[in-house]
Amino acid sequence: MKRLFPLFCMVALLLTACNEKLAEANYDVIPAPKEVMLGEDDAFVLTPNVTVYYEAGNTDLQRNAEFLSSYVKDLLGFSLQVQEQNQDVDNGIVLSTSPDAFDETEAYQIDITNRQIVVLGSDAAGVFYGIQTLRKSLPIGETGKVALPCVTIKDYPRFHYRGMHLDPSRHFFTLDSVKQYVDMMAMHNMNRFHFHITDDQGWRVEIKKYPELCEVGAFRDNTVIGHNSNLYDTIRHGGFYTQDELRDLVQYAADRYITIIPEIDLPGHMQAALATYPDLGCTGGPYKVWNRWGVSDDVLCPGNEDAMVFLEDVLNEVMDIFPSDIIHMGGDECPKVRWKDCPKCQAKIKELGIKADERFTAEDYLQSYVMDRMEKVIEARGRRVIGWDEILEGKVADNAIVMSWRGIEGGIEAAQKGHDVIMVPTSYLYFDYYQSEDIANEPLGIGGYVPVERVYSFNPVPEELNAEEQQHIIGVQANIWTEYIATFNHVMYMALPRAAALAEVQWCNQEQRNYDAFLNRMNHMAQLYDLYHYNYAKHIFHPELLLDTIAPTLATHKPITLRQDPPSEQYAAQGASTLNNGILGKGAYNSDRWLGFRGYPIDAVIDLENATEISHVNFNANVNKGSWIYNPKSATVMVSDDGENFRNVAHDEYPISTWEDKDGIFHYSLDFDPVSARYVEVVIESFDLPADHEAYGEPAWLFVDEIEVK
Ligand code: ACM
Ligand code: ZN
């Protein structure tokens, strides 16, 4: 090697003489590698003359080499030759594997000298991730040569299950779009694609034994507008994937080291199947492919053997298509109301000798019977089952993997019982939640608030677990449900850049994580998104958009009490002080900025601490009619000098919001003649739900924030 130095020094000198400043690669990529050790030597110069060599006869590495060449073409405008390696390489990129050189799978080491780039993997997947790191290191749009500083990078993932989920059932996305989603996942070093292909609103997988599923179940006549308003569009919506298309997709993903985990959500979320085969339900229907959102009470009838055989047949065909070692059988959100009234279900409960106990109902155990039967079908094919955390409600097989979505508690319980767990808690990893609080300027989301920083802060391994239990947390995933996401462009907006934060949660060790450093790394990642025309949310690049404090008013941070009942426990935020903490309620009602009340007025008393002249009271209400949240009915302002005797100074009444009115955040302002007072009482009354609402006559929710007094 030493012998070669003079030659390369000459090259370097020549380059300097031509005054050529090469654009440089930068190894600050997402997800951040475990170790990056920059060397002192000259950089490797990447030019169109560089060849990528792969281990002779290794078709996986050949494909990887072709990926690398195509990435270089995307980034720099020229592709690289790809060739089997038959001799020592000079001025080339060498891809090879050596399982014995690594303790981990999916691991890689990159060594860059001025002569060559070696990407050594524990396996072909490891080499692929090394290539992703190289790809993300390269500058974009340089058409000439690029310098890759001399370096050794050692890397492997924290979790071997690194997932993203997509729901093409609520809204259908084309095969090409789904492939683009797979590409996006590959760029983030993810390896498990959870594909939710059946639900109440659409059946998306061709099943040869039941061809009507894709004739009837794959299409709905119309769709509710917004958050379950009572208004409907007039557009027939649907689509499905043929088995050939799905096999093509499986291969496309496998080429990128991504396993597709199909989900047949059972025995609930089955209304599209029931619309096709009404006899499989408890009541016999008629049913329609659902055109609303939520959880349908109409589920499969376990008392009907045909329904069980249907599920078994479907799972068998699905396993023919998807070679995944894990098969998802859903199990979430299965109401039991039909089963309670169904003679067939009750007879089945009797026949099986099922008894309720102090923890679960007989119908809960009837669901366990369904899950158990389907698990046997899956295991008979040498696969493993995974289900949503509801499968813990009743009996669950020891080796079932639990997907903890309603928080991390299900995951903790499962790990303590010895189940493997994938963490997907809504409050960190549901990418159908809003990522900005300014929802008036966001495309529609389901609600909630999961900004990039929140995703980044997630530690998937709860401290409550002991070392052995912690081993059961085998992976992390984010979910994109698409009730409110009708276009693939919108899917990508919800996915990115949160997927980048997730990628570091999945790949990097906890102590390696640093949000500010991540934000720096995001700048280059965003350029990659631009290059590939990936739509992404830009809030993190505009922190001023996150500004959320009000100019303090007379009420800000003053003692405040709620005279009547406290807010609902579920929507209590930081208690009464949420109303005057100077932080403005923005975004979704179920973020911690809003207090939610139901069935009684808000009655807040603020102590201004001194007699003060006032003439305005303002507050905001968050309206979301599909979630039973309406605007206030009236607001009253009273004042007092002693905190006991109050006098009325202002009162306003408001018309009830109709389905034609927009949901969102509304500002209310009460002005009155200036008065001097120490105590201000604000009473805000709520409506009952109107006649055109599904829950007519029930009390509406009222969500209020920041009371300002001026
Ligand atoms: C789920 O979000 N229903 C699993
Ligand atoms: Zn039944």
Image: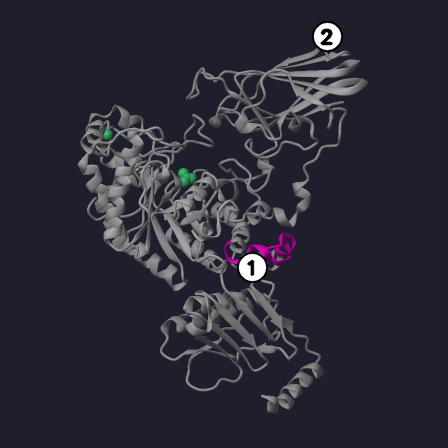
> Which amino acid, mark 1?
Ile
Relative placement, left or right, of 301 versus 704 is: left
| 36 vs 61, nearest the viewer | 36
Residue at position x 48%, y 60% from top? 189
Residue at position x 76%, y 27% from top? 553
> Which amino acid, mark 2?
Asn
Q: Which residue is mark 1?
A: 30
Whether residue 4 appears in this view of the structure is: yes
Residue 558: percent from the left, percent from the top? 74, 25
Could you tell me how many numbered marks the image carries?
2
Majority SS type along the magenta span: helix
| 166 vs 558, nearest the viewer | 558
**Crowd band around label 1 with a 10 angstrom C-alpha radius: few (<14), some (14–19), many (20+):** many
SS at mark 2 in the image: loop
The range drawn in magenta is: 506-521
- In the displayed structure, 585 sits above or below 422; it is above
Residue 482: percent from the left, percent from the top? 43, 41
Whether residue 73 appears in this view of the structure is: no
- In the displayed structure, 615 sits above or below 95; it is above
SS at mark 1 in the image: loop
- In the displayed structure, 30 sits above or below 645; it is below
Q: Which residue is mark 2?
A: 645
Mark 2, mark 1: which one is toward the viewer?
2
